[in-house]
Image (cartoon, rainbow, N blue to C red):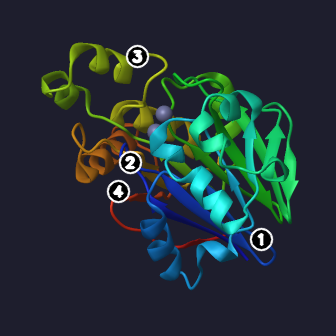
C-alpha cells in the first residue's frame, strides 16, 4: 500500500497525508487541529495514528499547528535546521527528542518510506520539496516554487504521482486588491508558480513519464480551480500531446480523493 491524500491545499493552509502498510505521515501542518483530524477521520485515521510530520518550510500556511500537534500527540517532526530556527513559536513546542533535523541534500527513512528533500526557490529560510519512495514508486510534492529550474524538472521526472503548485493567474493577480509589494513577491522568482508555469512544467514532465498530477496551493483571491485545470489542458492540446494525463485540483476546503499507487 502506498497512498496519498491531500487534506487541504492553498494559500490558506496546507497538509497532505501519506500511508504505507507500516507508517502514516503528514507533510506540513498548516490547518487547525480540528480540520486535520476531521479530514483524517474521513480516512479512518486520527492524529494519534500519525508517526511523523515532514515540513517543507516555515511559512504559517504550512506550520500553523505543527508545534501544538507534535506536542499533544508526541509526533516526531522532520525539517532542516534553518526551518527549525525560523519558526521559534513552533519549534519551542516540539520536544528535543521529536526534533529530527535533516540535511536537505541527504535522504532519510521513515519506516518503509525513503524521503529525498530537494531545494526549491521560495522566500523562506531553506524551503524544500520532496520525492518520497516506497516499493519502487515515487510521489513528489512541489509547491511554493518561485520558478522552475532544470534541476527541479529532473527531481520530478519519473514521479508516479505529483502534487504541483498552480498558485495564481497573472491577469487576476494584476488587478487584485493585493498591495504592489505582495504582487511582486508572488510573481517574483522566489514567490509562487502561475497557472501557465505549471502548465509548461507539466508539458515537459509528461514525456518523462509523469501522468498523474494534482494541482495545488491555489490562491483563493487570484485563481479558480477550473481556470488552473483548463490552462493545463489547453497547453496539452496546443502541444499536441497524446500521452494520457490524470489531472485533478486539490481543494482549499476538503480532502482530495485517495491516490493509490
Ligand atoms: Zn511559502
Ligand atoms: Zn505556502
Mark 2: few, some, or many residues within 10 Å (few <14, many ≥20)?
many
Check whether the beta carbons of the residues at disc 4 and disc 2 lie within 8 A of each other. yes
Residue lying at 47% horizontally and 51% vertically, measured from the top left: 14
Task: Report the residue that reaches farthest toward the bottom.
Answer: 44
Label 2 C-beta lies within 8 Å of the nearest ligand 2 atom: no
Mark 1 or mark 3, which has the lower sequence index?
Answer: 1
Q: Is residue 15 left or right of residue 102?
A: left
Numbered label attached to residue 252: 4
Quarter of the image with the N terminus is: bottom right
Against 96, residue 120 (above or below) is: above
Q: Is residue 28 visible?
A: no
Measure how far apart labels 4 and 3 are at the Cα level.
Answer: 23 Å
Residue matched to label 2? 10
Mark 1: few, some, or many residues within 10 Å (few <14, many ≥20)?
some
Residue lying at 48% horizontally and 51% vertically, measured from the top left: 30
The residue lying toward the viewer, choosing from 233 and 30, is 30
Amino acid at each position: 500500500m502506498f497512498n496519498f491524500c491531500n487534506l487541504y491545499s492553498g494559500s490558506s493552509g496546507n497538509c497532505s497525508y501519506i500511508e504505507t502498510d507500516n507508517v502514516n505521515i503528514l507533510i506540513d501542518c498548516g490547518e487547525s487541529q480540528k480540520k486535520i483530524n476531521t479530514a483524517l477521520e474521513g480516512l479512518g485515521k486520527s492524529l494519534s495514528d500519525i508517526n511523523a510530520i515532514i515540513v517543507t518550510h516555515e511559512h504559517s500556511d504550512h506550520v500553523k499547528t505543527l508545534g501544538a500537534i507534535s506536542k499533544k500527540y508526541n509526533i516526531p517532526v522532520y525539517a532542516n535546521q534553518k526551518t527549525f530556527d525560523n519558526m521559534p513559536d513552533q519549534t519551542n513546542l516540539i520536544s528535543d527528542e521529536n526534533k529530527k533535523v535533516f540535511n536537505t541534500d541527504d535522504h532519510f527513512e521513515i519506516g518503509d518510506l525513503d524521503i529525498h528533500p530537494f531545494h526549491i526557490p521560495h522566500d523562506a529560510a531553506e524551503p524544500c520539496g520532496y520525492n518520497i519512495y516506497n516499493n519502487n514508486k515515487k510521489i513528489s510534492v512541489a509547491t511554493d516554487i518561485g520558478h522552475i529550474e532544470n534541476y527541479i524538472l529532473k527531481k520530478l521526472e519519473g514521479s508516479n504521482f505529483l502534487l504541483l503548485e498552480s498558485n495564481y493567474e497573472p491577469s487576476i493577480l494584476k488587478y487584485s486588491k493585493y498591495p504592489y509589494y505582495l504582487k511582486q513577491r508572488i510573481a517574483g522568482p522566489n514567490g509562487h508558480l502561475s497557472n501557465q508555469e505549471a502548465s509548461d512544467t507539466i508539458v515537459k514532465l509528461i514525456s518523462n513519464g509523469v501522468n498523474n498530477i494534482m494541482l495545488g496551493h491555489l490562491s483563493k483571491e487570484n485563481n479558480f480551480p477550473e481556470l488552473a485545470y483548463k490552462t493545463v489542458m489547453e497547453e496539452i492540446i496546443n502541444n499536441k500531446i497524446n500521452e494520457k494525463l490524470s489531472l485533478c485540483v486539490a481543494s482549499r476546503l476538503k480532502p482530495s480523493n485517495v491516490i493509490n499507487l
